[in-house]
Each structure stands twice: as structure tokens, then as C-alpha cells.
Image: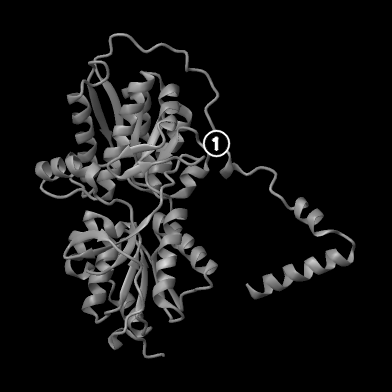
Amino acid sequence: MTVRIALMLFAGSVSTIAGQTDSKRDSSREVFFDATARQTLYAGPGRREPAPANVKEVLIGYFGPNEASDAQDSDMYRAAILAINRANRGGGLDGVPFRLVPRWSDNTWQSGAAEVVRMAYADKVWAIVGGIDGPSTHVAEQVVAKARLTLLSPGSTDRSVNLANVPWMFSSLPGDHLVAPVLARAIASYVGGDPFLLVSSTDHDSHLLAVEVGKSLFQRRLAPCYHFEFGPGQKDYSLLVDRIVQADVRTLVLIAAAEESAQVICTLREGGFHGLVFGGPGMGSRKFLEKADNAAEGVIFPLLYTPAKESDSFEEEFTRRFGNRPDYLAAHTYDSVSLLIAAMRKAGLNRPRICDSVRELSPYKGVTGTIRWDSLGTNCRPVDLGTIRAGRVICASEPHMPDDARFRSSRR
């Protein structure tokens, strides 16, 4: 990095000697088209097509595990069902009930894509909610781009999904580019000039977030003393934990999926690591809380859902019906389905007009707060910090360096 900076400075001095002005050189290097700053709208046909006659049900696709799949991600499906039921109690769409059409495959890139195709062309849904993460959302996006069908993802923070500039694509979660700076600021506030570790999984979503966190840390002139990576799906983390403990630091940044994060933290605490752990948004999920249990106490992470007065009825109904509180993924799924229903009520049964309405409804007030689209269809609302106290996710202020000597590194 030092060499690159030196070369850039040298190049600037040569251009001055040659008589080239800085402004001329800068203009020659300007990007001629910045897709991230341009809102891409669908400009094709279809908006004038009338709604079909004799519709008995308004179908909304759901690309994710459902109750029958016996997956831990079924809370998202349950929240979608609650939104559908609430809309039907309110009269559906001019008296026609809404119905959720769930389809899923654990083999996302092969049979998963086929399931999205079936929703779009065989089931003929009017919009799709999904997927549950970055990879499944990428798969669904490729289908809706050709099917001209609105896709609203409640489970992906992968910024590249929206950078594809598909006008049918929306993400209700703030992207990694908004999550990472908040996490980096908290890390910088806590560690000061002390060494810290970065540990990350190599799965798709964790890798992208780790890259964004690294960029944000670099902007603050911070870098981990070590960066350990591990592959997803491991069962034994004892060797990784040994390396973490031997590094003799009091701060760990752990970027991994919820279940893997829980397993690593449990093994860490058993191995004698008592320092502060920072992590990704997945630490606010029910899956993480149940797997990590007491080991999760005090972790710091970006908070993507804070229950408020607007979410009271949703929280109460979800807890009463399913026996557990909804996490940020369930809450954003509920908002995603509710937003699509509001768009259909405004636009009628017309795919391009539904997409237009989803965009026009921004800012949308939901149980997760305000959903406000940027030019690429990502929710650009601010992100707060969260922590865990007595097994509950709560808001957190930025942590400060501790005075307790047991947290201090022996390197100081």
C-alpha cells in the first residue's frame, strides 16, 4: 500500500513538469457513467394491460424455507403468513384474498432457480418475497429480470444484488456498505491503538461483509493484527480458538453465519477468551441466540430491527401464535409482504405497475421502521448498534475501552 501511494504522488509530479494541469488530468480519469448513482426504471411494455378477469386469489411467491421444510429459517415464512392473514382480514384486494405460494430448494443454484421459474411462469404470482440470503436472492434476481416480476428480499445485505441495476429488485435490509461503517466505528472506539483480531468465514455473505468491514477499518487507519479465515460447515473449531487465544488480544471481530458464529463463540468462552466480540447482523437472529445461549452475552453487532410502538401488535401476534419473539429477519419479511400488498392495492394486478408502486411507496412505515429506497432499490435507513443482555437483543451505545485489567492485552 505504501508503494502504491508513492507511485501516485510521483505520477502527479511528472504531470506537473510536463505542463499538464491537475484539473485536466482529473477530468481524463473521471468515470463516464456511474450506475450506482442512476435509478434504473423499467421502460418496456405492459403498464397498459388490464387486470385479468375472474381472479379468485391474488398469489404472492415466497422463495425460502417453509414450515414443511423443517428448517430453522421458518420464522421468516411465519411472518409472511401473518402479513397475508392481516391483509385478508382487511378485505384482501377488493374482496379477493391474497395467498402465499412458497417454493424452496436447499440446492439454491440448480433446483432453487427452477422453483423461482415455476412461481413466475407456472404459478403466475404477481410478485416474489425472497430469498433468505445473498446467494438465494441472486438466483431469484436472475429469473425476475427476465420474467419482469418484482422481487423484494428480506434476508440479503449483499450490495452486489442491487448493483446489478435490475429495476425489479428491492432489498428491505440495509446493505453491507451501510452496516460496515457502523461496526468499524464501534471497533475503532473500543480498541484505540490496541491489537485486535478479524476472524471470518469464507461463505458468500460473510466474505462480502468482511471485505466491507476491512475497507471501513482502513479508512480509520486500522487493521487487524491477524485475519483468520475458516470454511463454512465446520464442526470442530478448537484449532481456530487455540490460535485466537494464543494471539493474546482482548478484542475479536467475528464475521460468519449465525450458527457458525454461535459455535465459535461458545468454543471461545470455553477456551478462556474473555474479551469483547464484535460481529455481523446475524448475531441479532433467533438462531444465534438459541445456539450461543449465555456465551452471547455482551456481543456487539449492527442492529437491524428495534421493536417499537409500531411493532407491538406484530410482536404480540407472532409470539402468541408461534411461542417465540420475532427476530430482524422475521420482522423484515413481514414488512416486505405488507409493502407488496400495499403496492398491489395501489397499482392493481399489473406487474410493471406493481413495481412502480413499490418504488413510489418509499418512504414506507413498517414494523422495522422506515423503508426508504436509494437509487438501486436498497433500504438506506441508518443502522444502529445492538448487544445481548440476559438473552435479549437490545440497543447499545458505542463501547469504550475497559478499565478492568483482565481485559488488557499482555502486549501493552
Is residue 347 visible in the rendered structure shown here? yes
Residue 7 point in image, percent of width and height: 73, 70
Query: Which quadrant holds the N terminus?
Result: bottom right
Neighbourhood count class around disc 1 (C-alpha, 10 Å): few under 14, some 14–19, many 20 upward: some
Is residue 119 visible in the rendered structure shown here? no
Q: Nearer the viewer, residue 103 or 47?
A: 47
- Relative to 239, residue 120 above or below: above
Q: Quadrant of residue 206?
A: bottom left
Residue ID at (41%, 77%): 191
Residue 370 point in image, percent of width and height: 36, 42
Q: Residue furthest front?
A: 309
Query: Which quadrant holds the C terminus?
Result: bottom left
Residue ID at (44%, 46%): 380
Residue ID at (28%, 76%): 238
Is residue 82 toward the left or the right of residue 181 in the image? left
Q: Residue furthest top?
A: 53
- Relative to 223, residue 154 above or below: above
Q: Nearer the viewer, residue 119 or 331?
A: 331
Residue matched to label 1: 39
Tell me the SS state at disc 1: loop
Callout 1 amino acid: Gln
Residue 145 point in image, percent of width and height: 47, 32
- Relative to 283, residue 151 above or below: above
Residue ID at (34%, 46%): 155
Q: Quadrant of residue 50?
A: top left
